[in-house]
Amino acid sequence: MAGSGQIRQLRRRIKSVRSTQKITRAMEMIAASRIVKAQRRVREARPYAEQIHLIIKGLAASSDVANHPLLHVREETRTVAVVVLTSDRGLAGAYNANILKLAERTIRDEESAGRSVDVYVVGRKGKGYFAYRGRQSVRTWEGVTDEPALEDAAGIGETVMERYVAGELDKVWLVYTDFKSSLTQVPVRMELLPVKPEEFGGGDEIAPEFLFIPDRDTILDRLIPRYVEAKVFHGLLESSASEHAARQRAMKSATDNANDVASSMSQVMNQARQDQITTEISEIVGGAEALSQGR
């Protein structure tokens, strides 16, 4: 027979689960609203990157763009950098696990080829992951992934570009999560450096009536680093949208599970109360019969 203590315990557990359900539902709604904002930022950033790319293609048609240091391909690849974009917060399902798995595979592939690998990490989750496994990150960035800014991308891009131009790095990978839809996010890796000359091929030369101040080559030298920063910014925005989408799904699943658990415990509690009431009625009836027989 279920006692009053068991019923009180079940009631407390149901209350606790319902409270948790309110929190997960609120987090689900917040993540849903941030997905919309993140998608809008991806769309708003696209014209900037497209115009930089278009101008570089136009300038490259009349200049030797291959001479730029960021496009210089090393004869031998000895040191590789892997920039990994993770999140600062958890509760996002398998979002971080998937991107870290791809990062580990990239690092393993490069090291198996006899190359030294420097790891750069964006996000607390990635920082903690590599620190726990004894791999020291060259540099980490925190507080970036929730709402990335172009300045954040510039800081990350400048860090690896300076080392690449100085000859300290021979290749740079950017590992991030590509946002396909609210249900699909795909971990991808992109070769950030060196920039491929063919990315600027096939452009039409800018019309001669344009006056360039400073000259074409100087403008080109300034725009190519901005192009690399735009690619980093694109990766940050895609990762941010993917993180919010993954968190929305995880919180929805948690909300549904909490509802199932609370419903199941309510059924157990109701059955316990029915058993208790039935027992009490039986005791009353038995007592009444005993009293009537004793007269």
Image (tube, helix red, strand yellow):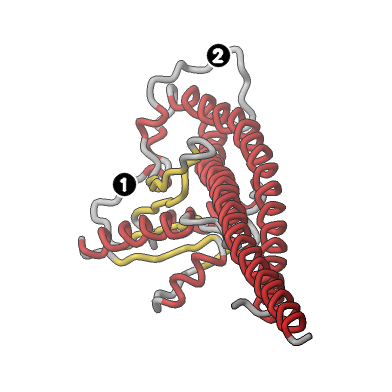
Q: Could you say which is closer to the camera, residue 62 or residue 44?
A: 44
- The residue labelled by disc 1 is 73
User: Amino acid under label 2?
Assistant: Pro
The extreme front residue here reads: 295
User: Amino acid under label 1?
Assistant: Val
Q: Is residue 119 at least partly visible in the picture?
A: yes
The extreme left residue here reads: 113
> Which numbered disc, 1 or 2, marks the residue that appears first in the sequence?
1
- The residue labelled by disc 2 is 208
Q: Quadrant of residue 82?
A: bottom left
Q: Residue at x 67, y 50 (%)?
A: 147
Horizontal and vertical percent position of residue 177:
47, 47
Residue 210 vertical placement versus 261 (above, below): above
Q: Could you say which is closer to the camera, residue 173 or residue 241?
A: 241
Quadrant of the frame with the C terminus = bottom right
Q: Residue at x 58, y 31 (%)?
A: 46
| Residues at circles 1 and 2 in contact by the CB criterion of under 8 Å | no
Q: Secondary structure at mark 2?
A: loop
Query: Gap in Å between the C-alphas at discs 1 and 2?
Result: 31 Å
